[in-house]
Amino acid sequence: MAHESILVVEDESDIQELLRFNLAKDGYRVQCTDSGEEALRLARSSPPDLVLLDLMLPGMDGLEVCRKLKSDSRTQHIPILMLTAKGEETDIVTGLELGADDYMTKPFSPRVLTARIRTVLRRAATEPFDEQSPVKVHDLAIHPGRHEVLVSDVPVCLTRTEFRVLQYLASRPGWVFTRYQIADAIHDGDAMVTDRSIDVQIVGLRKKLGEAGRYIETVRGVGYRFKESR
Ligand code: CA
């Protein structure tokens, strides 16, 4: 049984009830509110282990709540899982860039949601990403020190930028990144990296990786993700 606490910010009462019921059943301590202002107050006075945040709220909207949580030292470490409606890709991108960890599009199945919550909580508990440690995922081995990528033990020759994009995505499998986040992470001072040029890098990467190129998934309207290994 889980013991973590979850703050649910959702103004639709039937969804809020459904969430409360299912999360409590899974052993989480659940607190619910239908207002962004109240959510901030609760998160500051007793920080939960995770915030489940609906983006469409009356009054202060979810993105503003996210921005405020991430800019306050008392709450910036709390992982945020956004709840969004279909067609809110622009808001999803904004939320991820503000520091939200992941999102779920409504309607969702409670089972899928609790799996996603476990993943986000697990990520929050793991060590921060270390640029120098080798990454092994699926049949890929990435050695930052040697600047080397092996697919099923066969070396693949990548450009410097392609290597950094791959290393960045593969270091956090299952995690969605926007083009801007990728560009920001691989930017190394001398070269301009625009978000459109990220698409070009991905095309090149997939081609060079061959079969393994399928691990780089496009998340329509949002960005890219390295396929999670199970
Ligand atoms: Ca809503």
Image (spheres, helix red, strand yellow):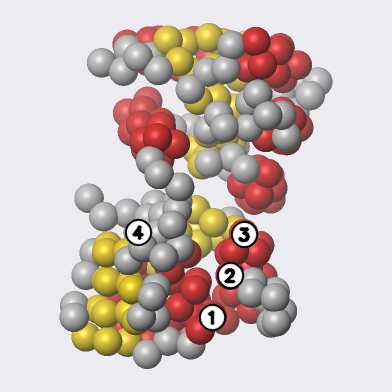
Q: Residue at x 57, y 17 (%)?
A: 47
What residue sits right under mark 1 in the picture?
161
The answer to whether the residue labelled 1 contacts the one labelled 3, judged by CB atoms less than 8 Å apart, is no
Which one is nearer the viewer's eye here, 48 or 143? 143
The answer to whether the residue labelled 2 contacts the one labelled 1, judged by CB atoms less than 8 Å apart, is yes
| Location of residue 154 (image quadrant) | bottom left
Q: Residue at x 36, y 63 (%)?
A: 133
Q: Report the amino acid beneath label 3.
A: Gln
In the displayed structure, 81 sits above or below 174; it is above
Q: Is residue 124 visible?
A: yes
What residue sits right under mark 4 in the picture?
227
Which one is nearer the viewer's eye here, 216 or 181? 181
Indicate left or right for 153 with 8 as reference.
Answer: left
Q: Earlier in the sequence, mark 1 or mark 3?
A: 1
Q: Earlier in the sequence, mark 2 or mark 1?
A: 1
The CA span between labels 4 and 1 is 20 Å
The CA span between labels 4 and 2 is 20 Å
Q: Report the amino acid beneath label 4.
A: Lys
What residue sits right under mark 3 in the picture?
181
| Location of residue 38 (image quadrant) | top right
In the displayed structure, 115 sits above or below 13; it is below
What residue sits right under mark 2 in the picture?
186
Horizontal and vertical percent for residue 206?
40, 79
